[in-house]
Amino acid sequence: MGTVEARERWGRPLAVFTAVVFVVSSLFPLGAGLAKDPEAFPKWWGPLDVGIAFFLAVLTLVVMALAGRKFSKPVEDATYRAYRVLIHGL
């Protein structure tokens, strides 16, 4: 199997998996922010949060490496606009 076929075969499922890991990773700070007593969390909560965040960073780099420059100009423009809105919203 060539590189192009591997990208096409694994690209979308990997991107979806990365999005799911992002959502799971986002639940940790959300849970900590909404908790009345964050000190009551188990000791493994923090290391698990950091581990998932590191795994998410690695997955993001893999997705970016596989995708290369295959994005069209409208997709790049839309992601840039979303980035600008989200960064100012935070």
Image (cartoon, rainbow, N blue to C red):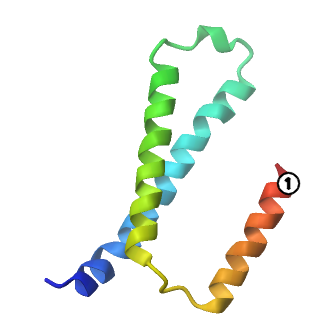
| 47 sits to left or right of 85 | left
Which residue in the structure is indicated by mark 1?
89
**Residue 52 locus on image (x, y percent):** 45, 39
**On screen, 19 above or below 46?**
below
Q: Name the residue rendered at 49%, 31% in the picture.
A: 50
**Residue 78 locus on image (x, y percent):** 71, 80
**On screen, 80 above or below 21?**
below
**On screen, 61 above or below 11?**
above
Q: Nearer the viewer, residue 35 or 64?
A: 64
Three-letter residue code for mark 1: Gly
Q: Nearer the viewer, residue 48 or 23?
A: 48
Judged from the image, the secondary structure of the residue bearing numbered disc 1 is helix
**Residue 10 locus on image (x, y percent):** 30, 73
Q: Name the residue rendered at 60%, 42% in the picture.
A: 26
**Residue 20 locus on image (x, y percent):** 48, 54
Q: Name the residue rendered at 52%, 22% in the picture.
A: 46
Which quarter of the rendering shows the N terminus? bottom left
